[in-house]
Image: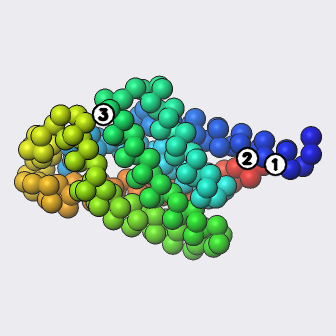
């Protein structure tokens, strides 16, 4: 086997293993106290952040896609695919900016800055996508009314009274929290696992 083929095989193998691990972690979801039940935190993006740091932003996108495809096969869908599509977009909004910045700034400071950029990107993009695309898609494909979605949120968070307050008081803090949790896990584990990730 040539060096190029060996390198390509290692690259594909790493993507496959990390994607599978992320898909398994996606099955273990943790609800949060201030957001409706369809907002749940999992650690799958922490794995993909580590993969993105080691293999680059292109690999991170591939892993996000495979993770969600595997989750569909393992867990099915209760959202007509809307939730999985949202997870893919939100995941990419976190891992792509972070891994792209880290690609050119490989240091602890670079990692921290990269993760902060990823968290901010996730927070902003998730708010825009939920307001203009994802929640309207839930209404269209799932047959929910907007009032029902807002009601699910207001039942656990009285600050939520309409779509804008749902975005401000549920979507934004949820995605900030998810980004921070995944980033902290990445910071704690990446250096310890980097030798394995770079084999």
- Res. 180 in view: no
Marking on residue 76: none
Residue at 61%, 55% in the rendered image: 58
Q: Identify the residue at image location x=64%, y=37%.
A: 17
Quadrant of the rendered structure where residue 155 is?
Answer: top left
Q: In this view, does 195 lie above or below 68?
A: below
Tell me residue 144's x, y (percent): 16, 37
Q: Which colour scheme is used?
A: rainbow
Distance in Å between CA atoms under marks 3 and 1: 38 Å
Q: Can residue 137 be seen in this view?
A: yes
Query: Compared with residue 197, is residue 72 higher up or lower down, i.e. above or below?
Result: above
Is 140 drawn above or below residue 130 in the view shown?
above
Examine the rendered structure and indicate whether residue 141 appears above or below residue 169: above
Residue in the picture at 90% in, 49% down: 3
Residue 162 picture location, percent across and down: 9, 54
Disc 3 or disc 1, which is closer to the eye? 3
Q: Taking 79 as reference, is 179 left or right?
A: right
Q: Name the residue under label 3.
A: 79
Judge depth for marks 2 and 3 and give the one in front.
3
Q: Which residue lies furthest to the front in this view?
A: 140
| Residue 141 x, y percent position in the rendering | 25, 36
Question: Which of 36/186 is in front?
Answer: 36
Numbered tag placed on residue 7 in the rendering = 1
Q: Position of residue 167 (x, y in %)?
A: 21, 58
Disc 3 and disc 1 in contact, CB within 8 angstroms:
no
Circle 2 is placed at which residue position?
A: 11
Taking the image as shown, residue 171 lies to the left or right of residue 66, namely: left
Within 10 angstroms of label 3, few (less than 14), some, or many (20 or more) residues?
Answer: some
**Which badge, 2 or 3, is on the more N-terminal residue?**
2
Tell me whether the residue at label 1 lies in contact with that at label 2, contact meaning CB atoms closer than 8 angstroms: yes
């Amino acid at each position: 086997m040539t060096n190029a083929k060996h390198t390509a095989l290692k690259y594909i193998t790493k993507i496959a293993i990390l994607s599978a691990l992320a898909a398994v972690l996606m099955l273990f979801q943790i609800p949060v106290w201030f957001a409706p039940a369809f907002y749940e935190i999992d650690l799958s993006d922490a794995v993909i952040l580590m993969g993105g740091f080691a293999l680059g932003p292109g690999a991170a996108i591939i892993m996000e896609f495979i993770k969600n495809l595997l989750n569909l096969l393992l867990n099915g869908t209760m959202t007509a695919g809307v939730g999985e599509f949202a997870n893919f977009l939100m995941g990419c909004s976190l891992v792509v900016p972070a891994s792209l910045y880290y690609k050119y700034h490989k240091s602890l400071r670079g990692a921290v800055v990269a993760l902060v950029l990823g968290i901010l990107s996730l927070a902003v993009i998730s708010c825009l996508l939920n307001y203009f695309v994802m929640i309207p898609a839930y209404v269209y494909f799932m047959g929910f009314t907007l009032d029902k979605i807002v009601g699910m949120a207001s039942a656990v968070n009285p600050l939520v009274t309409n779509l804008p307050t749902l975005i401000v008081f549920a979507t934004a803090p949820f995605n900030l929290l998810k980004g921070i949790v995944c980033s902290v896990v990445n910071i704690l584990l990446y250096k310890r696992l980097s030798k394995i990730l770079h084999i």
